[in-house]
Image (cartoon, rainbow, N blue to C red):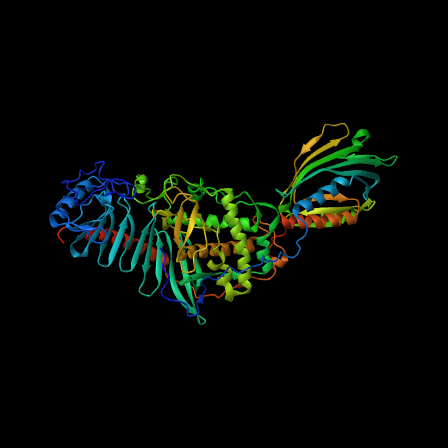
């Protein structure tokens, strides 16, 4: 069906019966790090193995209250084929009030069992939706939050010093199912969403190591910041 | 006379006075009933080939019988053959030499096999449809599903190749920086893309060799070559497209990709089938392409092979294609570092090894090992049986996957090296385009990010030739009209009485 054109390159190579040339495979790209499966397994194991992190937080504007927190990450399940990470974060909070003082919420005093709270957040991290990851101390983060809420005069103290790993997206892609229980009351179920997902870790080294692993996983999943500038 | 298969056929020198048309005794060697009988006194001595030229009265008698039989046929075969001198061939076929240099080759049943007149010729399928045609500057090929390919050699030495008027390309030669290139401007629906080729000689023929648009860092070829870290789910956005619906029983893309080579395989097949669908006239009814012959079964009656059903591209076949893609990535990497050796490293000389898999890029008419003709459409898969001898212009391949009415899977077909070169060029062009997409979209659209060593070095563009700004689509439309007129004109010339 095909015929070749009239014009023939004067420098045409002549290759009649040329044997097949041995060709080496192209080089593997420079080490691009562990596979996604290995990376997510690492993240899953480290998060599941952390156990409960206890810390106390206080606020300068609530000098009589001490917030005792017991934070646990559990049920972490990674799915490399979907680039997701399921997790449950449980925070038990005990509010202690100095003798002779009253802790108020909404202008009403809170006492007894109502000073015990449990927040259980179930969520799935979609790694492709993550733009960036940052690590900072929980105390710094809370103080930054106060400043952003136009209350820089309020300082928050967290003891011991623990660290947060925050997954950041430009869109409110992080969705949570929150079950919040105050005292003996029935749990209140909500489904908030936001641009941040925060994980707490006992020490800075663990937080940084996991941030590095998350960054690699996000890259392997095709996430990351796509802004041209 | 006994034919090779032992069937009884006519015997011009027999003492019987005539044959009974369509009787059990006048089967030809092909098993086809002859539509005529030859009067015993109507023959002249046979020539060395066993052909017998009939007397004037014999010719008139046979033509009368043939035209009587043709009156019950359809299309081109219904038209009466003009008067002329009839030659009877040993296999029962007839040649009629008519006025003005017109020559008709008829099958034993009277259907028209081919027609020749000064400066033009045409061949026909047994159901009367055109198979091929040539005039001074135009060649027309019509596939088994009615797909028309028109090739026009233009006065400016460019060549226009049209596929059904919907798509095609203009090929012209360009001298740039002291080198001669061929530049093809393809039009495919709304898309317009330009490919560049150089030439080399292989098996004594001048071949066109595709020149990639870009050369990449070796690590980029490596990134596409080696498995990715994880299966990558990917959505092509083809859902709901007419072409995918049309080929749904024949091809389905993978849901996730283990490597760039696998992703490039579906890219390659998808682009090939989408283009093939356009070329096949993008039928209004996705289930019924172009002008499928309702009586396609009739094609098998005389020297034509056709598949009764699709033999789809199975996962195994697709993996075999993916293996070729991966190997070609190695060739492309080698050629990128030694462009002067590109034809040796990345083209036909490199891939003509037994079991190499080719994917048909456009409609093609071929011949099977038992000399039946059949068609191959875009997306057909062929496997090379053996490396052809050094002086051979063709190669034998077995059909692995094919669509209904194309050459059946399993048969051996002979394909010209020029056509295989065209398939290889198409393959490399799609690979080039797919690599560009991978490079530009890695880390996006669900594709994994490539490491910096792969994408850090910018791609090196090959020689940029001046763009061809001609309105190729308008040229293709005009060409299609001219082809239709030429077909009509051929009929007029062939069957005009009293010339």
Q: Position of residue A171 (x, y in %)?
A: 62, 46
Q: Nearer the viewer, residue B267 or B293?
A: B293
Residue farthest left in this picture = B57
Q: Is residue A171 above or below residue A178?
A: below
Q: Is residue B403 left or right of residue A60?
A: left
Q: Nearer the viewer, residue A134 or B123?
A: B123
Residue farthest bottom in this picture = B178
* Residue B351 visible at all: yes
Q: Position of residue B384 (x, y in %)?
A: 45, 51
Q: Nearer the viewer, residue A162 or B364?
A: B364
Q: Is residue B233 left or right of residue B308?
A: right
* Residue A153 visible at all: no
Q: Is residue B436 left or right of residue A224?
A: left
Residue farthest right in this picture = A99
Q: Tell me the quadrant of the picture where the C terminus of chain B can be found.
A: bottom left
State the count of labels: 0
Q: Position of residue B248 (x, y in %)?
A: 45, 40
Q: Nearer the viewer, residue A156 or B240?
A: B240
Q: Tell me the quadrant of the picture where the N terminus of chain B can be found.
A: top left
Q: Is residue A125 above or below residue B206?
A: above
Q: Position of residue A199 (x, y in %)?
A: 73, 43
Q: Is residue B229 left or right of residue B194?
A: right
């Amino acid at each position: 069906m095909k015929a070749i054109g009239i014009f023939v390159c004067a420098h045409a190579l002549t290759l009649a019966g040329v044997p097949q040339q041995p060709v080496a495979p192209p080089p593997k790209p420079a080490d691009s790090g562990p596979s996604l499966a290995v990376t997510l397994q690492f993240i899953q194991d480290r998060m599941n193995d952390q156990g409960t992190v206890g810390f106390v937080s206080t606020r300068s504007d609530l000098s009589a209250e001490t917030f005792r927190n017991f934070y646990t990450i559990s049920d972490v399940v990674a799915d490399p084929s979907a680039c997701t990470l399921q997790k449950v974060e449980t925070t038990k909070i005990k509010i202690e009030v100095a003798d002779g003082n009253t802790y108020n919420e909404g202008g009403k005093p809170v006492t007894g069992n109502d000073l015990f709270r449990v927040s259980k957040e179930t969520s799935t991290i979609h790694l492709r939706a993550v733009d960036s990851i940052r690590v900072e101390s929980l105390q710094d983060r809370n103080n930054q939050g106060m400043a952003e809420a136009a209350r820089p005069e309020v300082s928050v103290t967290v003891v011991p010093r623990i660290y947060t790993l925050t997954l950041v997206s430009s869109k409110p892609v992080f969705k949570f199912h929150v079950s919040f229980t105050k005292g003996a009351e029935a749990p209140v179920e909500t489904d908030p969403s936001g641009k941040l997902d925060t994980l707490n870790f006992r020490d800075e080294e663990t937080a940084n190591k996991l941030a590095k692993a998350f960054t690699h996983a996000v890259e392997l999943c095709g996430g990351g910041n796509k802004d041209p500038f | 006379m006994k034919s090779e298969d032992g069937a009884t056929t006519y015997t011009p020198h027999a003492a019987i006075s005539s044959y009974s048309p369509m009787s059990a005794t006048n089967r030809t060697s092909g098993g086809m009933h002859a539509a005529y009988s030859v009067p015993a006194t109507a023959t002249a001595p046979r020539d060395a080939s066993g052909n017998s030229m009939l007397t004037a009265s014999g010719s008139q008698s046979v033509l009368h019988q043939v035209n009587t039989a043709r009156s019950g046929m359809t299309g081109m075969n219904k038209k009466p053959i003009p008067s002329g001198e009839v030659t009877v061939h040993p296999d029962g076929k007839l040649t009629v030499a008519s006025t003005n240099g017109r020559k008709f080759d008829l099958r034993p049943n009277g259907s028209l096999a081919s027609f020749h007149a000064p400066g033009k010729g045409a061949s026909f399928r047994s159901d009367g449809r055109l198979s091929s045609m040539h005039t001074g500057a135009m060649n027309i090929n019509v596939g088994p599903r009615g797909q028309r390919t028109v090739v026009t050699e233009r006065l400016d030495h460019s060549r226009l190749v049209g596929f059904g008027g919907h798509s095609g390309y203009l090929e012209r030669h360009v001298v740039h920086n002291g080198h001669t290139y061929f530049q093809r401007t393809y039009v495919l629906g709304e898309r317009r893309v330009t490919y560049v080729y150089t030439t080399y000689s292989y098996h004594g023929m001048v071949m066109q060799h595709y020149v990639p648009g870009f050369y990449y860092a070796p690590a980029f070829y490596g990134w596409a070559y080696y498995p990715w870290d994880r299966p990558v789910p990917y959505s092509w956005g083809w859902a709901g497209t007419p072409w995918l619906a049309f080929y749904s029983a024949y091809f389905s893309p993978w849901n996730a990709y283990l490597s760039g080579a696998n992703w490039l395989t579906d890219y390659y097949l998808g682009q090939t089938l989408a283009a093939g669908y356009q070329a096949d006239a993008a039928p209004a009814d996705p289930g019924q392409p172009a002008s499928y012959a309702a009586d396609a079964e009739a094609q098998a009656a005389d020297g034509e092979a056709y598949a009764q059903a699709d033999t789809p591209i199975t996962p195994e076949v697709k993996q075999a294609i993916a293996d070729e893609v991966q190997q070609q990535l190695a060739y492309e990497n080698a050629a990128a570092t030694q462009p002067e050796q590109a034809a040796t490293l990345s083209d036909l000389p490199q891939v003509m090894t037994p079991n190499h898999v080719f994917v048909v890029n456009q409609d093609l008419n071929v011949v099977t090992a038992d000399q039946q003709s059949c068609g191959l459409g875009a997306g057909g898969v062929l496997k090379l049986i053996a490396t052809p001898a050094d002086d051979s212009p063709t190669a034998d391949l077995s059909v692995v996957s094919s669509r209904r009415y194309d050459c059946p899977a399993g048969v051996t077909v002979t394909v010209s090296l020029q056509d295989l070169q065209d398939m290889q060029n198409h393959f490399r062009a799609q690979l080039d385009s797919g690599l560009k997409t991978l490079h530009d979209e890695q880390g996006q659209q669900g594709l994994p990010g490539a490491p910096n060593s792969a994408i850090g070095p910018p791609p090196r563009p090959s020689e940029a030739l001046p763009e061809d700004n001609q309105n190729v689509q308008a040229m293709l439309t005009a060409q299609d009209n001219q082809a239709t007129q030429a077909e009509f004109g051929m009929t007029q010339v062939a069957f005009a009485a009293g010339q």
